[in-house]
Each structure stands twice: as structure tokens, then as C-alpha cells.
């Protein structure tokens, strides 16, 4: 435990001790040194120079090619000298013209050159100094001659056999620090080179960096922040919703009567079915049955009631719509030439009333049930329900009791005797007695054994003849 | 010793499970979030929005005790389609994964053109519903 504490203490102490050091190093890094170079690098345009003009006349004292004749050695160079104050920047401009020979000078020779030398001090000249030092001008010439960093000393110039106008500009800064501050806005420091000569080194102020411009001069600058990254190509501006509000959409649905009409097929996979073939295929796909055994005109003049038992709540009905069972029921009636009528009986009596209607050739029955039945009446007990429903039917038509009984006997009530009966409900085919109770001989009963889901189909059961 | 090993393994599994949860959990993009916010603002329980190249998929939760006499269910779908299409001009197909609260799911698909016609009033609600493709993703409720 103690060892752990000691270790943690050492780590913490080391961290706190190192923190200021790291910080100080960072400060030093912010000062960027402008490297010493003989290649210049000072923006002299920024300097407010004091100018001094010198007009000098150098009489001819040599003949011929001064380099190739004894005259060269005999030339008496005339030189001038002026003092340079410490921490001074110099700039030279000169112009030389060849004078007329006065007879003392040999023809064909001559020229002019100007040379600056500074044997005494560390006078740093720009890169062209050597060229100008040995320059030999046969025509009038103007050149700018600049020195870079001056600390102290004097300058010597020599001209022969010509008239020259020399312009020397100078600016004395007084200290290396002032020099650097005026030129770079930073600070300066006197340093000694490896050969023992002194020079002034400049540093950019904190937060600035150094760089060399295209014209070759050094400058300090604030690093520009990288431009904001343009938005990525796939990055799109967020659209504001400009469409209708939900309430308006609800109102539109509420005001549209057509989708509420149960006889209108709605969900048909986004396709509008027009031809009989399309509708037949749709019905066969959805219910999983075949309609080919039906006479195409079997339903002429007859109805098909599509009955939604009240056990089919809105949720289940929505599913029957979405799984296209509702549309398939309507199309099944249509393609067999029946007139479809969707009904929602309020009670079992009303449901049986629809079922026994002699005009109805077929029934499609949607119900949620636990066993084979119609309105929860098992097959064995259905005949009494059918009989009562027929009584209601004929009575409603205005027949007397005697007539009603007679009509019922003629019509029969043991079976609905429909062309087809499609019971889309759980367990609808569990009890085979459902077949004879619902369809006539040769008629087709459609049902499902066991639990039925709206995504499933029904099976086909043909009632044999003589049964 | 064995108990400690088992404990360590359990801890590692729990940590990994937590990391995986945070790493792979659904994080909507700004565009997807804008749609979610718009739908949730209308009390639609939108859970996920996925914007793919030219497709927008919205998953939302739907109560099953609805009354559709006034078309409330269908109006909800139409509104979701409208929002997804209007807020994604590049999308050509909009898909709704309707997740009923009993776990049953159905996929509703339609195209941008149909939605635009509906928004502009050039398509009636009935005509709009007829253009919707439906694909059950589960068996549906027992009949």
C-alpha cells in the first residue's frame, strides 16, 4: 500500500515539475528566428532612409585595356571613405559615365567600375555585391547596391577613369532590437557567427511565424486559420417541412367518401386492376384458390354478401385490407358476375338474414372464431337459425304465416345451398359438416383448418352430389 | 479462484455488451433527426428514419385500438409519406414500416411522384391509398 502511495506521489510530482518546463519551451517555440543570410531578405521599402549624394570625377590615368596593359597596374585609384554608425542599414545607388578623353588618355580603353569594400567590419552585402565589385561598365549604368545587416565599421569605394554619381542611403536604428522591431515587428539579438563576426538576429513576435515572400524578403505573419471546410458533397441542407399539416390531411380523408365505401377495393398492391384476367389472378393469389371450375356467368342476377362479423374489429379489418383479402372478396364476386355487397351485421340474426337471402348466390364471411361455426352456431344447430331467418325474410315480404311455412318448406333450411361459401376465419374447415350446411351439391366451400392469419389463404372443398 | 475467473468473464462480457450498445445504437443524421422531430411533433411515435441514396425508410409505432372511421390511420400514413418526401427532395421512394403495438408489422411503399400529387391536391385520399403497395412483414393478427 505504501509503495503504491509513493509511486503515485512520484508520478504526480513529476507531472507538476515538468508542467512549467513544457510551458516555457512552448513560449520559446513561438519566437521564430529569421535566419541570417547573405541573400538579403529585408524589405527596404519599409525603411525611411536618409539620403546622401556624392558627385565624383575621376580623371583618366590609364590607357588601353586596363586589365591587359601595364596601364592597369599604373592606375592610381581614387577612393573615398565615409563612416558608418553602428546598427545602420545602407543602400547604394550609383551612376557612372565615361568622360571625353582629354588626350592624356589612350584611345580605345577605359570604362568605369565601382567597388565597395569593407575590410574592417562585418558588413553584410546583398548577393550581388561580388558581381558589382568586379563590374566593368562601358556604358552608363545604374545599379542598386544594398547591404543587409550592419553593426559597425566604414565603407571604402573606388572609382577610376569616369564620372560617377553615388547615392548612399542610410538608416541608423541604434540597436539590433530596434532594427528587428521596425522591420519585422519582433525583437532582435546580437549573435556571433562561427568565424567570430557579430550579426543581428531577428525574431518574430509571439504568435507570428516567419516566411519568405515570392520577392525573396522575409516577413513575419499570423498563420491564417484554415478556411472552413466546404460542406461535403453528400451533405445536404436540412429541408424544412412545407407540406400540409396532419390535421389538414385528416380533414381531407374525413371528407373523402369514396375510400369509406366498403364496396371499393383499396389496397391492390398499388395497381389498378382493369381486366377480368388481372382480377382473377389477384383473387387466386390472395385467397390461394382457383376460379377455373366456375362458370364465368354463374353469378348473373345474383348477389354475393361480403359479411364482416362484429368480431372483426377495426384492427383486423385494416389487416384484411392491407393483405388484400377485402379487395379480393369484391373482385371474386365481380369476376363471377355476382353483385358484391359488403355488409356489417349488427347481430347474428342480421347476419343469418343476409345468408339466407335467396338472391345471394354466394357468401364471403370474415369472422374471428374458435371453432367451425357461423355466428358461433355449430353446424348441427345451423338449420334452426336458417329456418328462423327465412321466416323473418318471408314475413318481411308480406307473406302470411301459412305462406311463410310453405315457402320455407319449398326452399329448405337444412343448408344455405349457395354456389360458394368462403369462410375466412379460424377453424372454418375443422368440421366438414360446414360444407353441406352452406353450399349446394357441386358447390364449393372455402375454409381453413386451424388458426388463420390474414396473410394466409383458404382451402377448397367441393360438396359432392347426393349429399 | 474459479469464482473470480467467472466474475471477471462476466464483467468483461457486460462491458463489451455496453460498449457494443453505445457503438452500434441508432444515431440519426441531422436530416433523419429533422424528420423524426417533425413526426414526433405531430404525436407520431417515429422511432427510426433511414435515408439511403434515393430512399427514405421510416419506422413508427402504431396503437391498435384506433378508430379508422375518419381515416385516422390512413391520414397518419399520408402525413408520414408527405413529411419524408417533402424533406428529402432527392428521394424517389418512401417506405413506412408500420409497427403495431402487438408486434405485427407491415411495410407500405409509394413513390415521390404519388406523394407530390397528393400533397398538391391532384390525387384524392382514395386514389392515394390505391397507389400504396403493402407488404406484411409478419403473419398479422389471428382471424
Image (cartoon, rainbow, N blue to C red):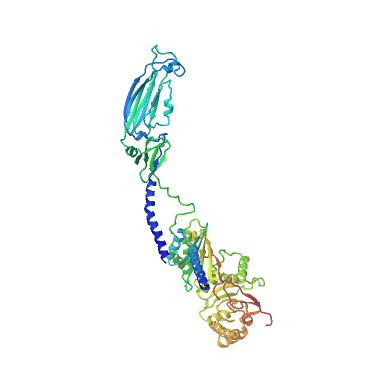
Vertical position of residue A124 compared to residue A237: above or below: above
Where is A282 relative to A56, above or below?
below
Residue placed most toward the observer, A326 or B57 = B57
* Front in this rendered view, residue A79 or A426: A79
Q: Looking at the rendering, which quadrant does residue A298 occupy?
A: bottom right
Give the vertical position of A126 relative to A253 (above or below).
above
Outermost residue, bottom side? A402
Q: Would residue B120 be seen by someone viewing this image from the given angle?
A: no
A450 or A202: nearer the eye?
Answer: A202
x and y percentages locating residue A62 in the rendered image: 41, 15
Rendered location of residue A156, percent (x, y): 36, 25
Q: Is residue A257 left or right of residue A455?
A: left
- Seen as rendered, the residue at the extreme front is A3
> Which of B82/A134 is in front?
A134
Quadrant occupied by the N terminus of chain A: bottom left
Q: Position of residue A204 (x, y in %)?
A: 37, 42
Residue B90 visible in the displayed image: yes
Quarter of the image containing the C terminus of chain A? bottom right
Q: How many marks?
A: 0
User: Residue B95 at what x, y percent from top left?
Assistant: 52, 63
Which residue is drawn at the image coordinates 39% and 12% (left, top)? Answer: A104
Amino acid at each position: 500500500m505504501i509503495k503504491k502511495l509513493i509511486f503515485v506521489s512520484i508520478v504526480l510530482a513529476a507531472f507538476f515539475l515538468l508542467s512549467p518546463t513544457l510551458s516555457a519551451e512552448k513560449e520559446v517555440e513561438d519566437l521564430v528566428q529569421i535566419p541570417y543570410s547573405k541573400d538579403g531578405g529585408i524589405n527596404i521599402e519599409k525603411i525611411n532612409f536618409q539620403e546622401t549624394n556624392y558627385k565624383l570625377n575621376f580623371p583618366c590615368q590609364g590607357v588601353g585595356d586596363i586589365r591587359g596593359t601595364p596601364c592597369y597596374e599604373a592606375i592610381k585609384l581614387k577612393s573615398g571613405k565615409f563612416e558608418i554608425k553602428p546598427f545602420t542599414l545602407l543602400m547604394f545607388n550609383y551612376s557612372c559615365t565615361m568622360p571625353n578623353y582629354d588626350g592624356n588618355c589612350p584611345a580605345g580603353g577605359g570604362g568605369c567600375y565601382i567597388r565597395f569594400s569593407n575590410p574592417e567590419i562585418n558588413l553584410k552585402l546583398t548577393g550581388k555585391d561580388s558581381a558589382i565589385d568586379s563590374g566593368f561598365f562601358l556604358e552608363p549604368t545604374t545599379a542598386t547596391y544594398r547591404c543587409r545587416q550592419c553593426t559597425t565599421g566604414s565603407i571604402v569605394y573606388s572609382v577610376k577613369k569616369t564620372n560617377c554619381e553615388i547615392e548612399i542611403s542610410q538608416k541608423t536604428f541604434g540597436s539590433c532590437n530596434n532594427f528587428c522591431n521596425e522591420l519585422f515587428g519582433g525583437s532582435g539579438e546580437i549573435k556571433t557567427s562561427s568565424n567570430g563576426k557579430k550579426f543581428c538576429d531577428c525574431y518574430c513576435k509571439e504568435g507570428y511565424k516567419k516566411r519568405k515572400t515570392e520577392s525573396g524578403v522575409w516577413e513575419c505573419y499570423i498563420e491564417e486559420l484554415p478556411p472552413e471546410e466546404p460542406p461535403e458533397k453528400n451533405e445536404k441542407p436540412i429541408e424544412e417541412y412545407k407540406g400540409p399539416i396532419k390535421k389538414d390531411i385528416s380533414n381531407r380523408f374525413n371528407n373523402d367518401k369514396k375510400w369509406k365505401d366498403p364496396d371499393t377495393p383499396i389496397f391492390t398492391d398499388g395497381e389498378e386492376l382493369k381486366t377480368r384476367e388481372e382480377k382473377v389472378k389477384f383473387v387466386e393469389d390472395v385467397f390461394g384458390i382457383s376460379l377455373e371450375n366456375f362458370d364465368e356467368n354463374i353469378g348473373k342476377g345474383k348477389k354475393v354478401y361480403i359479411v364482416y362479423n362484429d368480431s372483426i374489429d377495426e384492427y383486423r379489418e385494416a389487416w384484411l385490407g392491407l393483405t388484400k383479402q377485402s379487395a379480393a372478396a369484391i373482385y371474386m364476386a365481380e369476376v363471377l358476375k355476382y353483385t358484391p355487397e359488403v355488409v356489417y351485421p349488427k347481430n347474428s340474426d342480421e347476419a343469418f338474414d343476409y345468408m339466407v337471402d335467396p338472391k345471394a348466390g354466394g357468401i364471403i364471411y370474415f369472422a374471428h372464431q374458435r371453432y367451425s361455426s357461423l355466428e358461433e352456431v355449430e353446424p348441427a344447430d345451423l338449420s334452426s337459425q336458417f329456418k328462423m331467418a327465412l321466416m323473418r325474410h318471408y314475413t318481411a315480404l308480406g307473406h302470411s304465416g301459412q305462406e311463410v311455412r310453405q315457402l320455407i318448406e319449398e326452399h329448405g333450411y337444412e343448408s344455405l345451398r349457395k354456389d360458394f361459401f368462403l369462410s375466412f376465419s379460424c377453424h372454418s374447415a375443422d368440421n366438414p359438416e360446414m360444407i353441406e350446411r352452406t353450399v349446394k351439391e357441386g358447390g364449393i366451400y372455402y375454409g381453413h383448418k386451424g388458426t388463420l392469419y390474414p396473410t394466409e389463404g383458404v382451402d377448397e372443398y367441393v360438396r359432392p352430389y347426393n349429399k | 479462484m474459479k469464482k473470480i475467473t467467472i466474475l471477471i468473464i462476466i464483467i468483461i462480457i457486460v462491458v463489451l455488451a455496453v460498449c457494443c450498445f453505445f457503438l452500434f445504437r441508432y444515431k440519426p443524421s441531422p436530416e433523419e433527426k429533422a424528420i423524426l422531430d417533425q413526426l414526433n411533433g405531430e404525436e407520431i411515435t417515429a422511432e427510426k428514419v433511414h435515408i439511403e441514396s434515393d430512399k427514405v425508410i421510416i419506422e413508427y409505432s402504431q396503437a391498435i385500438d384506433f378508430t379508422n372511421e375518419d381515416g385516422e390511420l390512413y391520414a397518419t400514413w399520408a402525413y408520414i409519406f408527405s413529411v419524408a418526401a417533402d424533406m428529402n427532395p432527392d428521394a424517389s421512394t418512401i417506405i413506412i414500416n408500420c409497427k403495431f403495438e402487438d408486434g405485427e408489422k407491415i411495410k407500405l411503399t409509394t413513390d415521390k411522384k404519388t406523394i407530390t400529387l397528393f400533397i398538391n391536391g391532384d390525387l384524392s385520399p382514395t386514389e392515394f391509398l390505391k397507389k400504396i403497395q403493402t407488404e406484411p412483414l409478419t403473419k398479422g393478427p389471428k382471424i
